[in-house]
Structures are given as structure tokens and as C-alpha cells.
């Protein structure tokens, strides 16, 4: 029996790799459809098309951060257009998704650097909606103030 342990380990590793590849492929396909995998029930969550939120980050090209959820929640600053992004500074798009199966709301954050009009993605994150709701509400408030003037 101990002679088969290397084969068993290799088999388990291959199964784990196959599951990971299937998950990545599924997420890519859903992304092309404007969907995301729900954090709770793993079904397809649809993009809430009300707004695509834009925030400025106090980061430049090579900067990194740990604890992405906490860092982003405390450092993102609402802006209304890509023209407000200073040269060499990063920004992020925030998209909201609603799950029709379990009712969960979540967000996807795309951290990017704009170079000569092109967006170069630095990181993608998925989080629960509730922890970022105050930021999204502040963005909506600023947007409504700028349109009422």
C-alpha cells in the first residue's frame, strides 16, 4: 500500500488543479457575459447597470497593498470621470452585482493605471456589497450634486 502513496498524491494534486482550472474558466465565461460568480451560492450574479463607479487610489504604478478590502475601503476617493485621474496615479472601477438565486449583492473592483488613454489592470477583487456601501453612496451623492448644478 505504501508503494502507491506517490501516485495517490499526484492524483489528488491533479484533481485540485482541474477543479481550479474549471473555476477560472467558468469565471472568465461569466465575465464575458457581464456576470460574476456569487460569493455565497456560486450561481451567476448579474451586473447591476445603474452605475459604474469610479474611484481614485493614492497609488502609482508599482505600489502594492496588503489586506485589499480594508485598504481599498479606507483609501478610495470618488471621482466622476477618467479626466480627473492625475498622470501616473491609479484608479479603480467598481461594479455591483445582484444574485437572483440568493439575493446577495457583491462588488467587483478593477484596480488600474491609465497610460495614454489605455487602462492597464493591476488587480481584481470581489467583496461583499455592505462593507463598501458608504463609499458607493458617497459617490452617488457627489454625482447627484454635480448634475444639479
Image (cartoon, grey):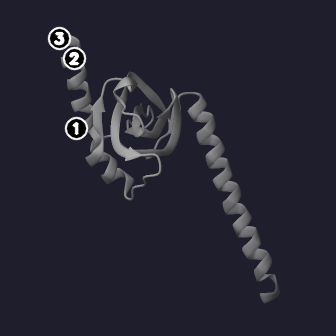
Q: Nearer the viewer, residue 3 or 144?
A: 144
Classify mark 2: helix, strand or loop: helix
Residue contact between numbered discs 2 and 3, judged by CB atoms under 8 Å? yes
Which residue occupies 64% across, 54% down?
A: 20
Mark closest to the chain's N terminus, 1 or 2: 1
Residue 5: which quarter of the image?
Answer: bottom right
Which residue occupies 47% across, 51% down?
A: 62
Residue contact between numbered discs 1 and 2, judged by CB atoms under 8 Å? no
| Residue, disc 2 | 146
Between the residue at mark 2 and the residue at mark 3, the CA separation in whole angstroms equals 6 Å
Between the residue at mark 3 and the residue at mark 1, the CA separation in whole angstroms equals 23 Å
Describe residue 10's horizontal placement relative to residue 110 as left or right.
Answer: right
Which residue occupies 21% across, 24% down?
A: 142
- Quadrant location of the C terminus in the rendered image: top left
Q: How many marks?
A: 3
Describe residue 52's horizontal placement relative to residue 140 as left or right.
Answer: right
Between the residue at mark 1 and the residue at mark 2, the CA separation in whole angstroms equals 18 Å
Residue 25: which quarter of the image?
Answer: top right
Q: Nearer the viewer, residue 87 or 22?
A: 87
Say which of marks 1 and 2 sits in front. Answer: 2
Classify mark 3: helix, strand or loop: loop
Q: Nearer the viewer, residue 130 or 140?
A: 140
Circle number at residue 118? none
| Residue, disc 3 | 149
Which residue occupies 66% across, 62% down?
A: 16
| Residue, disc 1 | 134
Q: Please provide percent x and percent y for residue 131.
A: 28, 45
Residue 135 against residue 13 in the figure, above or below: above
Residue 57 against residue 79 in the figure, above or below: below
Q: Nearer the viewer, residue 54 or 39?
A: 54
Amino acid at each position: 500500500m505504501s508503494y502507491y502513496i506517490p501516485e495517490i498524491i499526484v492524483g489528488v494534486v491533479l484533481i485540485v488543479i482541474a477543479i481550479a482550472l474549471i473555476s477560472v474558466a467558468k469565471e472568465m465565461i461569466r465575465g464575458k457575459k457581464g456576470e460574476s460568480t456569487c460569493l455565497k451560492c456560486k450561481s451567476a450574479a448579474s451586473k447591476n447597470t445603474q452605475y459604474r463607479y469610479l474611484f481614485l487610489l493614492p497609488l502609482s504604478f508599482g505600489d502594492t497593498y496588503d489586506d485589499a478590502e480594508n485598504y481599498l475601503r479606507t483609501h478610495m476617493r470618488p471621482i466622476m470621470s477618467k479626466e480627473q485621474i492625475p498622470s501616473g496615479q491609479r484608479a479603480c472601477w467598481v461594479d455591483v452585482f445582484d444574485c437572483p438565486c440568493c439575493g446577495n449583492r457583491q462588488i467587483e473592483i478593477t484596480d488600474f493605471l491609465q497610460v495614454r488613454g489605455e487602462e492597464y489592470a493591476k488587480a481584481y477583487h470581489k467583496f461583499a456589497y455592505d462593507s463598501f456601501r458608504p463609499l458607493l453612496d458617497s459617490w452617488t451623492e457627489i454625482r447627484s450634486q454635480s448634475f444639479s448644478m
